[in-house]
Image (cartoon, helix red, strand yellow):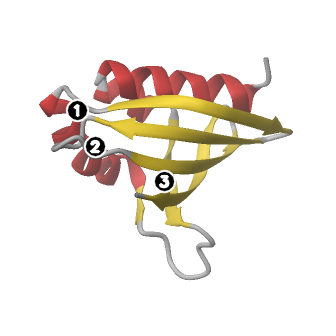
Amino acid sequence: MSTAEALAQRQLDAYNAHDLEAFVACYADEVEVRTFPGAGPPDFTGHGALRSRYGPLFEKGTIQAELLTRITIGKTSIDHERVTGLGEDRVVFAVAIYEVGDERIQKVWFIRGD
């Protein structure tokens, strides 16, 4: 298993376990998170922003992401996911593109659809 694939799986496992610290540990200190195609500045950066964004979701204890497909090429892993637990039977389909460097996820792009 490549580093990109292993990190994508590790962060998904932590996400589904609602383990914020294990989730954040998969990412570089200054990770950049963008909405695809991400031509402008990042939506947010760094561990503090990850904790602020995902902490409240994990505290609810209901959010889950089901991996539908994963493609990994070199330092990039692309996940197609079905996300539930957002309330009122809401289901979101998303694509996450993870770019890995120095043994952690450096950049993420999201494509979301409802």
Q: CA distance from mark 3 to mark 2?
A: 16 Å
Q: Residue at x 63, y 40 (%)?
A: 79
Q: Position of residue 21 (x, y in %)?
A: 32, 27
Q: Are marks 2 and 1 in contact (CB under 8 Å)?
A: yes
Residue type (three-letter) at the residue carrying disc 3: Glu
Identity of the residue drawn at 37% across and 46% down: 47
Going by the numbered disc 1, the residue's amino acid type is Phe
Q: Which residue is mark 1?
A: 58
- Mark 3 and mark 2 lie on one chain; the one further toward the N terminus is 3
Distance, label 2 to label 1, CA atoms, is: 6 Å
Q: Which residue is mark 2?
A: 54
Q: Which residue is mark 3?
A: 30
Secondary structure category for the residue under label 1: helix
Callout 2, which amino acid? Tyr
Mark 3 closeness class: few <14, some 14–19, many ≥20 residues within 10 Å: some
Q: Nearer the viewer, residue 108 or 96?
A: 96
Residue at 28% of width from left, 43% of height from top?
Answer: 54
Q: Viewed as shown, does residue 46 lie left or right of 74?
A: left
**In the rendered view, would you say 47 is above or below 36?**
above
Residue 46 image position (x, y, % from top left):
41, 53
Image location (x, y in percent) of residue 20: 30, 29
Circle 1 crowding by C-alpha within 10 Å: few under 14, some 14–19, many from 20: some
